[in-house]
Image: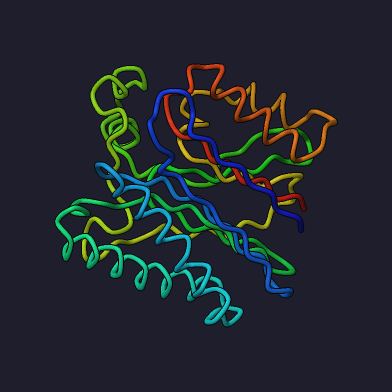
Amino acid sequence: MRALGITDKGLKREQNQDSYVIVDDGSALFVAVCDGIGGHQAGDIASTMTCNMLSSCFRNEYDGNPEEWFRMALKKVNRHVYEEAESKPELKGMGTTLVAAIFTENTTYILNVGDSRCYYFSKNDSLVQVSEDHSLVNDLIRIEGMEQEKAEAVGRHIITRAVGIWPVVEGDIYELNDEFKYLMLSSDGLHDYVDDEKMIDILMDNRSTGKKLEELVDAANGAGGYDNITVILVEE
C-alpha cells in the first residue's frame, strides 16, 4: 500500500480548515481527512487537533483490531475537541468531519463522521462511494424521499454529525473486502463540485498518483474553488 495526500485552500476561502494525516507503522496503514467547522480559526484548530490526536493514538495505541480502535479513538478525540471548545470562548462551536481508513493485510476498515467521503476506484474503472453522508441533504433524500435538487436547496452544507460538537458522537464503520486500484478520501470541496465522471477520467489517467491528486484539485478549482479541497489516494 502507498498513500499520498494533498490539501488546497481553494479560490474563495481565506484559510484552509482541512487537515489530513498518513501514518504507516509497518504492519498497518492509517489515513484520515478532516474538514473543520467553526468561525475564525476554530475549524482549522478542530481538524488539526483531530488529525494530530488520531496519529498519536494510532502510533501508540493501535492493537491490530481496527473496529475497536476506531471506536476508542473516536470517543477520545471527540471528548477532547468538545472539552476544548467548551473551555475557550473563541473556540465555541468548533468541530470537524472525519473520514479515515485502516489497511491491514487482508481487508480495509473505514470510519466516517460527517460529509467527507470514502470512495474506491475498482479494477473495472468504476467509482464506488463507500461512506454515507451524515448531512441534512442525505437525510431528506434517504428518509423523506426528496429529490436531490430540492434537498440541496433546503439543506446544503448542513451536517448532522461531527467530531467535537456534542459530548458523544457515533461514527459509521465499514469493512471493505473488494479489490481496488485506489481508495480515495476527500473533503466536500472535491466531491461537491467535481462529478463522478470527471473523477473517473482523472483516476484512469496514466499519470502518477501525485499528478492525479493535482488534477483533482485543479478540477475542483476549475469548478469555482468555493471550498477547501483535500484528497488522499491509497494505491493497492
Taking the spot 73% from the left edge, 67% from the top edge, the residue there is 106
Instruction: Please provide percent x and percent y for residue 144.
Output: 26, 32
In this view, the residue in front, 140 or 197, is 197
How many marks are shown on the rendered structure? 0
In this view, the residue in front, 234 or 149, is 234
Taking the spot 43% from the left edge, 56% from the top edge, the residue there is 48
In this view, the residue in front, 149 or 207, is 207
The answer to which quarter of the image holds residue 82 is: bottom left
Instruction: Please provide percent x and percent y for residue 53.
Output: 44, 68
Residue 118 drawn above or below residue 103:
above
Taking the spot 38% from the left edge, 31% from the top edge, the residue there is 14
Taking the spot 45% from the left edge, 43% from the top edge, the residue there is 116
In this view, the residue in front, 51 or 76, is 51
Instruction: Please provide percent x and percent y for residue 153.
Output: 27, 19
Instruction: Name the colouring of the figure.
Output: rainbow
The answer to which quarter of the image holds residue 220 is: top right
Q: Is residue 15 left or right of residue 31?
A: left
Q: Is residue 80 left or right of residue 119?
A: left
| Residue farthest along the right direction in this orientation | 206
Quadrant where the N terminus is found in the figure: bottom right
Instruction: Please provide percent x and percent y for residue 134.
Output: 35, 45
Residue 219 drawn above or below residue 122:
above
